Image (cartoon, rainbow, N blue to C red):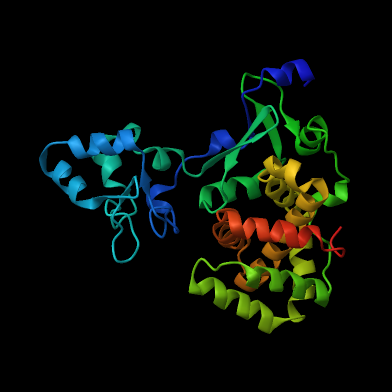
Amino acid sequence: MNEDEMERIVTIWPDFAPGFACKAGDCRHTCCRGWEIDIDSDTAQWYLSLDGPLGDELRRKIQYDDGTYSFRLMADECCPFLRSDGLCRLILSLGEENLCEICTMHPRLFALCGKVELAGFGLACEKATELLLAAKELRFHAEGGYPSFDFPALLAFLGHPVPETWLQPPARLTGSQMSFLLAQMEETEPIDSAWTQQLAALRAAGGSLLSQYEQLLAAQGGEVGKHLTSYILYRQLDKLPRYGTRALASYARCNAAFIYLMAVLLQDLPEAVRRWSEQIEYDEENTAHLIEACGDEPLVL
């Protein structure tokens, strides 16, 4: 992949992207609950123009506030069109092609890094997390049929090569490092009360988790930890001009370490990734706090 080829690149995707498909009713943590669901204006106007019982229901269940259309969530914070079996009534009635933009695109995410658009999936999605953790190699490809390349090659092309150790979670943690990680997570705005309770449980367990952390890293294998750390960094590469490589790499390693600590607590690495993502990755203020805090932490890199 040379610079002339990269000039023609529109978007870069992880190689596992073609395997993505919504788990729909098989998903344990639907993206149709717990989030405000905005509706783009064109789709909202079309929904509101529909005839019949579905059109009447849409008009009752769409609200307009401060220039934005959104669905009126139910008391349990579910979308009003989410069925009890986890399927979407709008897809079943109108077809997937007629969903609003946010429902069509989620959990796909895009960010510009210089002349390159970096695409991927938010790890709050079960399927995205499963694909990342199951990948034998974390490789990327440019739209247009170019050969795939590994993450260090992408960093080198962008002018930000890093040592290999920066793409791995710390092999072991000290008590002070664990305390630092928990203190920073406790400073973030909690997404729900369960997050606060999980942090308290980690704090209570204290040093007893440190040996289990090392054992879990070893059991999962080095490639899984490298994939996770690299992908966390990949998702923040658009912030290179603001924070620099070292701070972002430190952020990635700190968060990968925290995820493994959470996985020890939950006995479930995919769920630890998902919980971390919905708390940190989807909250710009929480992400910024951790980049700034971890970038100043001398113990990590």
| Vertical relation: 69 (above or below) 191 | above
What residue is rendered at 60% in x and 61% in y?
A: 276
x%, y% of residue 65? Answer: 31, 51
What residue is rendered at 69% in x and 20% in y?
A: 146
Q: Is residue 142 left or right of residue 123?
A: right
Judge by depth and name the residue closer to the eye, 3 or 22.
Answer: 3
x%, y% of residue 173? Answer: 82, 69
Residue 250, quarter of picture: bottom right
Residue 79, quarter of picture: bottom left
Determine if residue 287 is in view.
Answer: yes
What residue is rendered at 16% in x and 41% in y?
A: 55
Judge by depth and name the residue closer to the eye, 130 or 161.
Answer: 161
Q: Is residue 16 left or right of residue 242?
A: left
What residue is rendered at 81% in x and 77% in y?
A: 175
- Farthest residue in the bottom direction? 204
x%, y% of residue 33? Answer: 39, 58
x%, y% of residue 141? Answer: 67, 28
- Farthest residue in the front direction? 66
On-image quarter of the C terminus? bottom right
On-image quarter of the N terminus? top right
Determine if residue 256 is in view.
Answer: no
- Farthest residue in the top direction? 4
Q: Is residue 200 left or right of residue 75?
A: right
Judge by depth and name the residue closer to the eye, 152 or 132.
Answer: 152
